[in-house]
Every structure is written in C-alpha cells, then in structure tokens.
Amino acid sequence: MTVTYKKKDFASDQEVRWCPGCGDYAILNGVQQTFAGLGVEKEKFVMVSGIGCSSRFPYYMNTYGFHTIHGRAPAVASGVKIANPDLHVWMVTGDGDALSIGGNHLIHAMRRNLNIKVLLFNNRIYGLTKGQYSPTSEAGTRTASSPMGSLDEPFNPIALALGAGAGFVARTVDTQIPHLRGVLEAAHKHEGFAFIEILQNCVIFNHNVFEHIVSRDIRDDRQVDLRPGEQMVFGKEADKGLKFTPDAIEVVSANQADVWDPSGEAGAKAYRICQGSERGDIPVPMGILRQVQRPILENDIHAQVAEATAKQGEGSLEGLLSAGDTWTVS
C-alpha cells in the first residue's frame, strides 16, 4: 500500500529541546521530510538511540522508538530488526556514543550487515556532558577534559566504517538539506547496513568546527559530492575535478575527472579519498563512498530457523528445558 505523508506527520507532540542553533534541528527537519516522502507507513519505522544530545531523536519522531543506554543502541537495533524484519530500523547516535563506549557494538553491527540505517551526528565533542573532547576531536582541541589540548589522534568515521565492512557508507552535512535528504533516500533504498556520518555543529561547545568545509562562501571548493556513475567534479563553476593516480589524487580540469564508482568491494579508492583531505588541496568527500550488496544477516537467520524447524518441528520452551540430561533439586 502506498501512503502519502507530510513532514508534520512525523513530528511528535514533544517539545524539541536542543540548544538554539544546534545542527540537530536541521537534521530532524531533514529526516522528517525524507520519511514523509518514502511511501512507507510510519508505523513501520523504529528510531533507536543511545545517550547524548542526538539521542533525544526518538522523542521527536512520531514513530516507534527506543532510547537505550550508552553505546548499546546497535545491540537494541539489531534485536528489533531480527525480531521483525519488516520494520525499518534507523539508529541515531553521536561521535561519543558510537565511537567510544559503543565502538565495539558499532563495528560488529557493520560487519554483520543487518538491514539497519545508522546516522552518526559528528560534532567532534561531548555536548550533553558539557564539552569534553571526543574520539573525533582533532589533536590539540582544548576542552574541560583537555585544558592543554587533546593528545589523541582522532577516528575518521568513514575510514572506520569502510574498514569494518559496512556495505553503504556516506557523508553529508546538517544544514545542506537537499544533499542530506538525497543521502538518506539512498540509504533507505540500500538493502543492508547503511552508515551515514553527518557533520553537525555544536554551537555551545565546538562552534564552527566544520566552518572550513561547510561555510557557504567556500563549500563548493572544499567539498566534492561523490555521486555513483558521475564525474568527481567540484568548484563554484564546477570546473575542477579529481583523478586517481597510482601515488596520489590529483586536481584536474572537470573534463578529465574520474567517474566515481562506489561498488568496489575493497573500498580502496573510498579509503584513499577519505584520508587527509580536510586541510589539503583535495576537497572533502561527501555523498556515497561505498555501496555494495552482501548477504543480509536477518534473512540468513530466519532461513536457518526455518530449516531447523522443518527438520525438527516447532519445539517448545518446555521441551527445551527438559531436553538432555536434567536434574530434580529438592
């Protein structure tokens, strides 16, 4: 059944409580717009979150949802999807929630390839707990927990997702709504695990951390939108492009730019382009970095259960408890 919704149909009756100017407002707006246009009954959506500012998301979406515990959202999202594969499970998390205490859960969700979609809001700071440096904070970041500057080298979320085997890997920006919606729609269509990093501004504790990438006056020159099957072109006049060589990625004229193909199983070109481009001559990659199809875990689990049931019958809890050697304790 095809259903028609408006953005307001996905807005709950809860007061949205983020700091004025927070990038989360823009993301919420983009997600609600996107969901309204997917033609999916809203009762089939489930939003799952962990802990952090981004994790208020389930309260503000008029869908089913779980606000879980710190770092464990992937486990709950996996359980929901396995229990009911017909549901559209979207997980919302932050760079601290997902990549620190939740890192182990996230990478295993990626490699298992359940058909769930993960939105990682990356503001390079712990916002909810008042501004400590996070796993994505740049070295030298001065915070309450690193007053002389953090010494850790940060995670690159895209490189992490590629290395963990995520089948769909993408990046977008909180305030670039048309691009955000395009990436979300592509993630929805992808059969399997989808990971989307969203560059998000924290106006209180890490304001303008991505200004050198997303500022309106420079973003055309500092971002390249990776679109499957299209040339890697960028610049205000769309007159520049990127070309892979054995040893480098070169800036060339637009007509010499390589055509982007995210279907490479190894993701070698995606890994190359996502490294070290933020401060150099190469623009920061946005859009879809990897898109490959793999066996989907929940399908295989239910097929295995069906095979076992066909061979051994339905079974029962009582039969399971009394199977094999048993003892009576008096």
Image: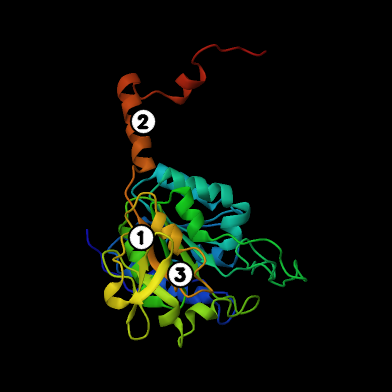
Q: Position of residue 15 (x, y in %)?
A: 53, 74
Q: Which residue does the image show at 48% across and 49% down from the upper left?
A: 164
- Mark 1 or 3, closer to the camera: 1
Q: Which residue does the image show at 77% across and 71% down from the upper left?
A: 148
Going from the N terminus, do you reach mark 1 or mark 3 first? 3
The dot on residue 187 is: 1
Q: Residues within 10 Å of mark 3 (few under 14, many from 20)?
A: some
Going from the N terminus, do you reach mark 1 or mark 2 first? 1
Going from the N terminus, do you reach mark 3 or mark 2 first? 3
Residue 304 visible somewhere in the drawing: yes
Q: Position of residue 233 (x, y in %)?
A: 33, 75
Q: Position of residue 49 (x, y in %)?
A: 53, 58
- Mark 1 or 2, closer to the camera: 1
Q: Whole-Å distance between the Cαs marked 1 and 2?
A: 28 Å
Q: Amino acid at mark 1?
A: Ala
Judging by the rendered image, the residue that carries numbered circle 3 is 12
Q: Whole-Å distance between the Cαs marked 3 and 2?
A: 37 Å
